[in-house]
């Protein structure tokens, strides 16, 4: 039991350190009094539950795939290096390709049982 408690504390501390960099997580903790790690875990848990129960899963997955990528792309544009720009440009090309393929395969597979 002590080993599990030690592992929990280790991961909790790591998550708290990572979330400390996000101003929105700090603001969440100040306003609600709930730990930012528990808040992030709850949001992630609800998101996973919605995906597994297929309640708005397509919308949630597409918003996540678009939202985070848009944020990371804007951050990459602001850096002086070109490697991260190329990485996110590749992401958007592949993302667009998969969305177009998904649309047409959904239309074609509709006719087959």
Image (tube, rainbow, N blue to C red):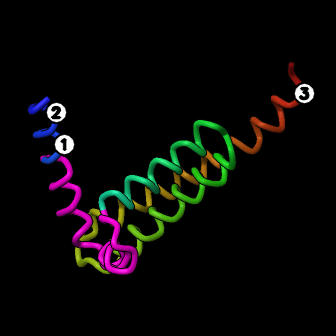
* Residue position marked by numbered label 3 in the rendering: 111
The disc label shown at residue 4, or none: 2
> Dots 3 and 1: beta carbons under 8 Å?
no
Residue at (23%, 72%) from the top-left corner? Answer: 21
Picture coordinates of residue 43 (x, y %)?
46, 56
Identity of the residue drawn at 30% across and 59% down:
37
In magenta stretch: residue 112: no
- Distance of mark 3 from mark 2, alpha carbons? 51 Å
Instruction: Place residue 73 in its image quadrant.
Output: bottom left
Q: Identify the element where label 3 is drawn.
A: loop
Name the quadrant of the C terminus.
top right
SS for tag 2?
A: helix
In front: 76, or 66? 66
> Who is closer to the viewer here, 48 or 5?
5
Label 2 close to label 1 by CB (< 8 Å): yes
Secondary structure that dominates the magenta span: helix
Structural crowding at the residue carrying mark 3, measured as other residues with C-alpha within 10 Å and reported as few (<14), some (14–19) or many (≥20): few
In the picture, the quarter occupied by the N terminus is: top left
Q: Quadrant of residue 85?
A: bottom left
From which residue to which does the magenta span run?
10-36
Q: Nearer the viewer, mark 3 or mark 1?
A: 1
Foreground residue among 50 and 81 = 50
- Badge 1 marks a residue whose secondary structure is helix
Left or right placement of residue 16 versus residue 47 in this view: left
Q: In this rendering, is residue 67 above or below 29?
A: above
Q: Residue furthest right?
A: 111
Lower sequence index among marks 3 and 2 = 2
> Circle 1 sits on which residue?
8
Q: Which of marks 1 and 3 precedes in the sequence?
A: 1
**Magenta stretch contains residue 14:** yes
Residue at 29% in and 76% down: 26
């Amino acid at each position: 039991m002590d080993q599990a408690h030690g592992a929990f504390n280790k991961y909790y501390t790591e998550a708290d350190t990572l979330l400390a960099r996000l101003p929105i997580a700090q603001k969440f903790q100040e306003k609600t009094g709930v730990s930012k790690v528990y808040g992030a875990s709850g949001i992630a848990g609800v998101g996973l539950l919605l995906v597994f129960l297929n309640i708005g899963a397509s919308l949630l997955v597409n918003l996540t795939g678009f939202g985070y990528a848009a944020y990371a792309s804007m951050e990459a544009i602001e850096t002086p290096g070109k490697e991260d720009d190329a990485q996110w440009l590749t992401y958007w090309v592949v993302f667009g390709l998969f969305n177009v393929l998904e649309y047409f395969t959904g239309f074609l597979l509709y006719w087959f049982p």
